[in-house]
Amino acid sequence: MSSTKNLRSTIEQIQREVERDPSSGLKHRDRLRKWVVHDDSRVRYGALDVMIKMSASYPLQLREQTPGIVSRLDDESEAVRGGALAVVYNLARWYPQEFGHTTELLHELLRESDLEKERGMAAGAVSRIAVLRPDLVTPREAIRESLVDFLERPDAEAVLDSCDVDSALVETAIDVLDGGDMASRPLEADLAPTPRTTGLSKPAQIGLRSIVWGAAIPLLFYIAILNALRFAYRFQHLSPMGRGKVMLHELRKLKFFGNRARRALYLRASMWPTATQIFPFLPGRAPVSEDIRQQTPPLPDDWGIRASVVRQRDGYYCRNCGVGGGPNGDAELHVDHQTPRSVGGSDDPENLRTLCRECHEARHARVFDA
């Protein structure tokens, strides 16, 4: 008994240290792994509370703790279950695939828990997983219906606020689960794959695009003339040889037309008119452009780890054309910011997706230097 009491005191001291400085918890990671499955519920909760305080600043360093965290989701102690839900909610935005197998249990807590806050945390955790890996959520339709039912409650906003869960996250998860595939993610709204969430059938989409391209031929001819005049004016200070080099560089963009998905992404990112720009109800939108006038801030020190985590989350596949890299192929995989950093885009996982080099170039409508 005295050893358990001493252990409680030790954890309480660590909790106070981590409250002041989250990095102080890093040296206790091996001990946390043991404490989170300890026989004493106060010890288990203390370990999870330390992880909650660390998870906002050091989520990548806590990945090795996920088995122990997940094992506490059905703990007999209400406090321990709540702590586990909070950690899952914070970590699922970084590596949702580690928690994909928990969605049935989260759904059970969402539907049947007697604690309102526990239901709110379960809604937040399963929504985090759904927004980034909807393909892992099961039972998909049942979870979607449960989230809809939860939001329709008059006290839903208050419950979510008490859990620090944004109701917009739950609303987004409901929309994503309507399709349930990776292309339904908000992260892929400007990419070429068509999500199952679209209300238009494939024949209708093809018909509308045919109408657009047929009507756009005169417009494309006009734009081509404007581009030629603009090119001549913009580079008039160059010699004929210099203008020829620039022209050859621009012609390199023709490589994007060899792949349907890459072509669609390039056209959306360029000034050429596309069906999605004319018919807003079609799936897809133009990628957010960079602001070359702004100085882009340096990447975070742990960018390499973040990029690796995003590639793993996306299965080492280009989310636009589907080519594989890493263990799944030879493609050079990049991590792209959906909203560029030059216009305020963050380095958070909700803004990062995996693209092959060629699709990354098409997304920015330019060819990268070797």
Image (cartoon, grey):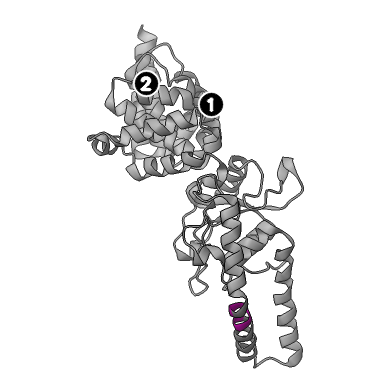
| Visible residue check, residue 262 | yes
Q: Nearer the viewer, residue 342 or 331?
A: 331
Badge number at residue 87: none
Task: Give the position of the C terminus as an image quadrant.
Answer: bottom right
Q: Which residue is mark 1?
A: 101
Q: Residue at x 53, y 30 (%)?
A: 100
| Farthest-out residue, top | 1
Q: Which residues are magenta?
A: 219-223
Residue 37 placed where, x, y %?
46, 17
Where is residue 20 shown, x and y percent of the image? 34, 39
Residue on which the image places disc 2: 80
Q: Position of residue 225 (x, y in %)?
A: 63, 86
Task: Write the residue at 72% across / 59% down.
Answer: 259
* Majority secondary structure in the magenta region: helix
Badge 2 local density, few (<14 within 10 Å), some, or many (20+)? many
Comparing 84 with 104, the one in front is 104
What residue is shown at x 51% (from left), y 41% (from top)? 179
Q: Please name the amino acid that badge 1 sits on.
A: His
Residue depicted at x 40% and y 38%: 22
In the displayed structure, would residue 80 be above or below residue 25?
A: above
Q: Secondary structure at mark 2?
A: helix
Residue 293 in the figure: left or right of residue 368: left
